[in-house]
Image: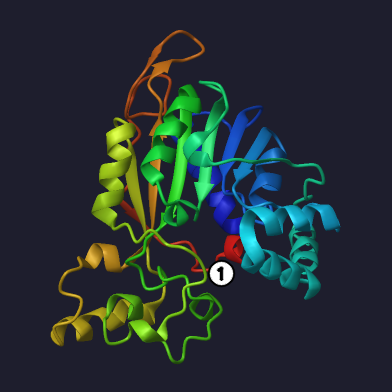
Amino acid sequence: MLAEVESSRSEMEHALGDRLQDKDILIIGPGQQLVEMSFFARHNRVTGIDLDVIPQHPSVREYLQMFRRNGSIRTLKTMGRKAMGYDRSLRREVERQGLAMDDDPTIVTMDAAAMTFPDDSFDCVFSHSCFEHLSEPGDVIRQVARVLRPGGLAHVDAHLYTSDSGCHDVRIFGGRRESIPPWAHLRPQCRHLVQPNSYLNEIRLSQWKDLFSQHWPGVEFRLRQEGDPAIQGALAPLREDGELKEYEDEELLSVYLVAEWVKPGMAADGETLSTSSGLASGEPVRRPLVCSSRSNTPESKER
């Protein structure tokens, strides 16, 4: 998890042409453990928004709020995770690796599709493994463009539904997939073997690109490829058997789509920023279209 967020920080600094420091950052869907918020809050002012109530204390009031707003399943999952000591263990490990957890994070219960922040409120907007769970991602993308300051950066990682792990079955994330064949959720004869752990909008790669491009002119895309050799090698035999013909190799063998956008406008020094570049000079940032995958770790936000 820390390696993933460190990789994102490096990419964001490259796109901005500046250090990620002393900035106002919005995190959409920070998850229950708040590691991302603590990481970015070391040198920035961070606000997280989520429709789920994220309890910060062993308070009956907070869990009643969660039950009323998010229902019994979300409440039971959270209580069970805490009762088993998962959150305590994760916090100890994160702090052992040198990241002090923020004990007073700024979290707002808010619909990302209808944000109440004023225009031009944030220097950066970040989201990891959240957009695939949104029912109206186009509205959220539009809202991000509104609350982002000119010259600011939006960085979104969307877990692709068409990836092998895109079904969000926790057994795949936990390495207990003996009964789940590759891409089971995309194969009609295997779909009954999959148990998604949350709502998924099932948006495909080309649809994501169209959505982001509609609202973020000049947005740049990268793909994080599948890192499991067993999954990589499983596609060719399925192709030979005539399966998965309606899907491109690119969308089956990519885990994340990274959408990165610098909002056009004026930089602090008065120079016009390029639509497709994060550098104040206006020079385009050259990036590979495809880069290696982050490790396919459990989706901690869904636990």
| Residue located 70% across and 59% down the image | 67
Q: Which of the 4 quarters of the picture holds residue 270? A: top left
Q: Is residue 279 above or below residue 198?
A: above
Q: Quadrant of the C terminus?
A: bottom right
Residue at the front extreme, as displayed? 68
Residue 216 in percent (x, y) is at: 34, 32
Drawn side of residue 232 relative to residue 135, left or right: left
Given residues 168 and 12, the one toward you in this image is 168
In the image, what residue occupies the spot 31% across and 68% down? 253
Picture coordinates of residue 299, whole percent (x, y): 55, 65
* 11 or 167, nearer to the observer: 167
Viewer-side residue, 265 vs 64: 64
Number of residue marks: 1
Residue shown at 42% from the left, 56% from the top: 132
Q: Quadrant of residue 180?
A: bottom left
Q: Is residue 180 visible?
A: yes
Residue ranking furthest to the top: 270
Q: Quadrant of the N terminus?
A: bottom right
Q: x%, y% of residue 198?
A: 50, 66
Say which of 209 and 11 sits in front: 209
Residue at the (40%, 86%) spot, across then down:
193
Q: Residues within 10 Å of mark 1 (few under 14, many from 20)?
A: some
Label 1 secondary element: loop
Compared across the picture, whether 10 is left or right of 263 comes to right
Is 149 positioned to the left or the right of 241 in the image? right
Q: Amino acid at mark 1?
A: Pro
**Residue 227 percent location from the top left of the image:** 41, 70
Residue 57 visible to the viewer: no
Compared to 153, does 92 lie above or below? below
Q: Which residue is mark 1?
A: 298
